């Protein structure tokens, strides 16, 4: 079901990140914008600006005074669940939706859950998940690499971290898609917010009497400045781990498999030279970065010669920055053994993705396990690949065959 | 060759640790630091240069000497 948006005549003054053609093939538009108008503008869904050059995106990400994280959604969601009020709004999804000082201490609470050591502990679980799902479709000779595989892995690892049942994976995925991918659809967006919100609330209450070894239980036992954490902070942090932990990584796994399905020489090379996997993973992250983040302009100011007003939205287009030819040679090519790759797929500055170790492990393991069992595969004949975009870009339908 | 990590610039991407685990360690919060006093053995100099060039925050510097 393709979304219909008003056609765009001039991308520099009227960009539309949900334009179907843009979502499918944004690269020529980014190239034009970087050249002709690196600070693009739109008035669709409020005043917003979009940065496409690496240097600009990095500068904005580090300028936390002018560009606040209080609004990070690329698409404004206009709906709120019943009972939600202004007082709740300040809690959000810390630390991603917070500025210092709230950002600083909430981030320290969740970072250890995604440390190298912890992530190494999730590797076997991830590998087993990948194998189990491949077992499910290997004999058939075809699969939807997005829905049957990519979408199934990260949600289950996150379920483990949150101590919630893996059997609800499809429900979690549905809610997260409603909140991110369908942020512009009031009905679906509200359904996701309410469904996920009330589910987490019940899980939180349950843990007050019967704590486990999961993230929410640990946060409930934590104090800050001598006070236990407000329930809304615990809920926000747990929600963040689910929201940010599944859509992004599944999109990344999906895009990488799309690349390999359409570049069989690259798949063959990775099978023949498994030592290339670590640089290949960085290159997939660069060339198919899933995440664009927004910021709230805090003051009337000028950036890159453009006059911004307090309350405007600023989009930091990390995917476009990572294809900036000023920084990357052969920027539009996937170079599996690219040695220098200072990409910012996980952002840069104090909001560097807290789950980046986990995402890298999941992407690596998902590709290793796929290639070990399915070294040769291609898009199905006449396959209609569909992509989601906006906040997170990645394939949503990806039919492949491996006869 | 000797290297150091600027603790104020490091944001925990852990690229250095992935590329040169012999030269860096990363704590539970992602903060990277050099192993020992940061002296790089000759055979690891290439890895040190790779780590420097791949740090998204440009947080690693080579000190003279």
Image (cartoon, coloured by chain):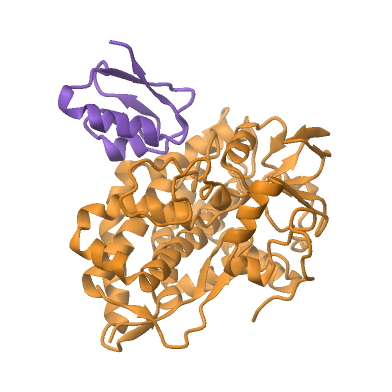
Chain colours: A orange, B purple
Q: Is residue A210 visible?
A: no
Determine the residue positioned at 51% across, 48% down.
Answer: A322
Above or below B6: residue A113: below
Above or below A124: residue A388: below
Residue lying at the far top of the rendered structure: B65
Depth check: give the residue in front, A315 or A107: A315
On the picture, is A329 further left or further right than B25?
A: right
Above or below A99: residue A131: below
Q: Is residue A351 visible?
A: yes
Residue A90 coordinates in the image, percent (x, y): 72, 43
On the picture, is B2 further left or further right than A302?
A: left
All told, the count of numbered labels is 0
Determine the residue positioned at 67% across, 51% down.
Answer: A33
Residue A92 coordinates in the image, percent (x, y): 66, 48
Determine the residue positioned at 38% across, 33% down.
Answer: B53
Say which quadrant the C terminus of chain A sits in: bottom left
Residue A261 coordinates in the image, percent (x, y): 37, 73
Say which quadrant the N terminus of chain A sits in: bottom right
Q: Quadrant of residue B38?
A: top left
Q: Quadrant of residue A175?
A: bottom right
Residue A212 coordinates in the image, percent (x, y): 40, 53
Depth check: give the residue in front, A178 or A309: A309
Depth check: give the residue in front, A242 or B58: B58
């Amino acid at each position: 079901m393709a979304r219909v948006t008003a056609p765009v005549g001039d991308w520099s003054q009227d960009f539309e990140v949900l334009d179907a053609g843009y979502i499918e093939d944004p690269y020529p538009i980014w190239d034009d914008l970087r050249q002709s108008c690196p600070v693009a503008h739109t008035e669709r869904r409020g005043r917003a600006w979009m940065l496409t050059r690496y240097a600009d995106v990095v500068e904005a990400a580090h300028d936390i005074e002018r560009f606040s994280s209080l609004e990070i959604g690329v698409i404004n969601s206009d709906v709120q669940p019943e009972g939600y009020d202004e007082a709740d709004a300040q809690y959000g999804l810390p630390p991603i939706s917070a500025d210092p000082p709230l950002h600083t201490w909430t981030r320290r609470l969740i970072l250890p859950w995604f440390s190298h050591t912890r992530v190494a502990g999730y590797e076997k679980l991830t590998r087993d998940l990948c194998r189990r799902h491949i077992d499910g479709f290997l004999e058939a000779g075809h699969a939807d690499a997005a829905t049957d595989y990519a979408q199934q892995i990260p949600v289950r690892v996150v379920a483990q971290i949150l101590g919630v049942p893996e059997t609800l994976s499809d429900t979690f995925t549905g809610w997260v898609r409603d909140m991110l991918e369908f942020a512009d659809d009031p009905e679906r967006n509200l359904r996701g917010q309410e469904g996920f919100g009330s589910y987490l609330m019940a899980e939180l209450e349950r843990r007050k009497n019967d704590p486990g070894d999961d993230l929410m239980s640990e946060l409930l036992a934590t104090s800050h400045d001598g006070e236990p954490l407000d329930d809304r902070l615990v809920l926000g942090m747990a929600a963040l781990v689910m929201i940010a932990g599944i859509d992004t990584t599944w999109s990344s796994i999906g895009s990488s498999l799309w690349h390999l399905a359409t570049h069989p020489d690259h798949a063959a090379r990775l099978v023949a030279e498994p030592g290339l996997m670590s640089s290949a993973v960085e290159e997939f992250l660069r060339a198919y970065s899933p995440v664009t983040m927004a910021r709230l302009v805090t003051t009337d100011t000028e950036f890159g010669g453009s006059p911004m007003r307090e309350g405007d939205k600023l989009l930091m287009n990390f995917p476009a920055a990572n294809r900036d030819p000023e920084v990357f040679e052969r920027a539009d090519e996937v170079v599996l053994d690219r040695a220098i790759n200072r990409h910012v797929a996980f952002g840069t500055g104090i909001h560097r993705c807290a789950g980046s170790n986990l995402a890298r492990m999941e992407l690596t393991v998902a590709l290793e396990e796929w290639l070990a069992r399915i070294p040769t595969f291609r898009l199905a004949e006449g396959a209609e690949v569909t992509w989601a975009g906006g906040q997170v870009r990645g394939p949503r339908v990806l039919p492949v065959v491996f006869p | 060759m000797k290297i150091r990590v600027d603790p104020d610039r490091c944001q925990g991407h852990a690229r250095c640790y992935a590329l040169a685990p012999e030269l860096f360690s990363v704590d539970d919060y992602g903060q990277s630091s050099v192993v020992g006093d940061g002296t790089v053995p000759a055979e690891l100099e290439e890895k040190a240069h790779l780590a420097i060039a791949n740090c998204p925050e440009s947080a690693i510097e080579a000190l003279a000497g």
